[in-house]
Amino acid sequence: MKIALIGYGKMGKMLEAIAIERGHQIVSRIDVENPNDFYSPEFSSADIALEFTTPAAVEQNIRKAWAAGVKVVSGTTGWHENLPILQRELEENGKTLFWASNFSIGVNIFFEINRQLAKIMNAFPQYDVKIEETHHKQKKDAPSGTAITLADNILSELNGKHSWTLSPEQNDFSIEITAKREGEVAGIHSTIYDSPEDIITLTHNAKSRAGFALGAILAAEFLQDKTGFFTMQNLLKINN
Ligand SMILES: NC(=O)c1ccc[n+]([C@@H]2O[C@H](COP(=O)([O-])OP(=O)(O)OC[C@H]3O[C@@H](n4cnc5c(N)ncnc54)[C@H](O)[C@@H]3O)[C@@H](O)[C@H]2O)c1
């Protein structure tokens, strides 16, 4: 498969290594210093573009790739409230996007267990739920896209909570999310249910960025013969 990289930072470099390992070819690498490469024949020769940049850049990058006839896998976080706008555009114009707040297979298994646990906890109101996440200091958004997905999945299953809130803000109807920024941490997420008697903790701890990059390449391989909008639930078929 011919792959274009949009964003050649930490994830872009990890994606390049894993794509080559799996026999794919990198035909274009776009970062802030060469935006005109979106209009190059090398970029438009790509089967898929892997977009890992910033919340400010992602939507225009996706539109530029679509204009060049290239399907997009994006993992950029911190903008997903605008995702429905892009979904409408792609449905109207026959374009393709695979977006995930977290491409790690382990995290997506964790998402499903988190959802099941929230369902169970409806019967046990003595437990109050909160979320904690820790990432490296360079991470631009807080809370992480993964923490927001965890919170949204709990909100869709658990009665009594109506929103999430970033610590230290608190109220009884919101799930409190604590976001810590430390050293080189690739990503640790915990869902915590606290009662007067005990604590139930579910944790996912990423050892490196390799799991995110592998998931994004698997998503690109999955997209080859498809058109439309896809997420990790389509790829992994967990609980289908
Ligand atoms: N979904 C996932 O599984 C997953 C995993 C890791 C990181 N991420 C997200 O991916 C994004 C990138 O993470 P990173 O660790 O590689 O960050 P990074 O800062 O190392 O790299 C981002 C790169 O994007 C470039 N960039 C900025 N604006 C651009 C533009 N307009 N066009 C092209 N390139 C541009 C920057 O110059 C930089 O090289 C973040 O939003 C992060 O949260 C998602």
Image (cartoon, rainbow, N blue to C red):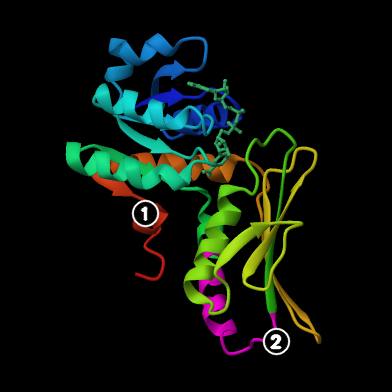
**Three-letter amino acid code at disc 2?**
Gln
* Percent of width and height locating residue 34: 46, 10
According to the image, label 1 marks what residue? 235
Question: Which of the 4 quarters of the picture holds residue 232?
Answer: bottom left
**Image mark count:** 2
Circle 1: element type:
helix
Q: Which mark is residue 126?
A: 2
Question: Which of the 4 quarters of the picture holds residue 161?
Answer: bottom right
**Three-letter amino acid code at disc 1?**
Leu
Question: Which of the 4 quarters of the picture holds residue 183?
Answer: top right
Between residue 155 and residue 212, name the one nearer to us.
Answer: 155
Q: Residue at x 31, y 12 (%)?
A: 39
- Relative to 82, is 192 above or below? below
Whether disc 2's CB lies below 8 Å from ligand 1 is answered no
Q: Residue at x 31, y 23 (%)?
A: 46
* Magenta stretch contains residue 115: yes
- Relative to 103, is 33 above or below? above
User: Dot 2, crowdedness within 10 Å: few (<14), some or many (≥20)?
Assistant: few
Range of magenta residues: 111-127
